Amino acid sequence: MSYHVLLVRTAAIFGFIGAMMGSHMAGAGSYAFRPIHAHILVVGWLSLFAFAAFYRMYSVPRKSKLAGAHVWSAIIGTIGLTSGMWLYTVKPFDLPETFTTVFYIVGGTILLISFLLFVFVAFKYGKDNSKTPEM
């Protein structure tokens, strides 16, 4: 499966989850999930979709280890950050606070690394290949 398809499918799942959370919050009249909802939509839906668009528009070799590291760290980091935020904020299970804090931080750190990797991907493969003269 190509990177852009993997990313757009993952983004679609996050978009659906975020929309469902927003619908639930509106129906329940409680905005307890607001920060989690926002991160799911911004990081999960918007960022992953933007990455997918980049991989679709530019020629990035499928065998690029840099691109592979970026894509998988983006997906893992998004899942880790948002689920860690949920565990830390909502406390749905009786987990030790140290565990939920570390889970949240590790997920966010992986996502931060993903964004740094994307900077390298964008500069390495994001070359302008248009044939039109610049104005």
Image (cartoon, grey):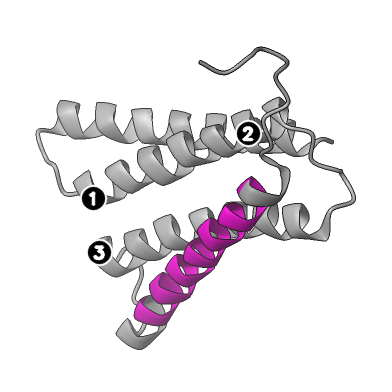
| Residue type at tag 3 | Thr
Magenta-drawn segment: 101-122
Dot label at residue 134: none
| Residue type at tag 2 | Phe
Residue at mark 1 to residue at mark 3: CA–CA distance: 9 Å
SS at mark 3?
A: helix
Residue 112: say if magenta: yes
| Residue type at tag 1 | Pro
Dot label at residue 35: 1
- Disc 3 target residue: 89
Residue 118: say if magenta: yes
Badge 1 or badge 3: first in the primary sequence: 1
Q: Is residue 93 visible?
A: yes
| Dot 1 and dot 3 residues touching (CB under 8 Å) | yes
Dot label at residue 54: 2
Q: Is residue 52 left or right of residue 36?
A: right
Q: Residue at x 16, y 49 (%)?
A: 32
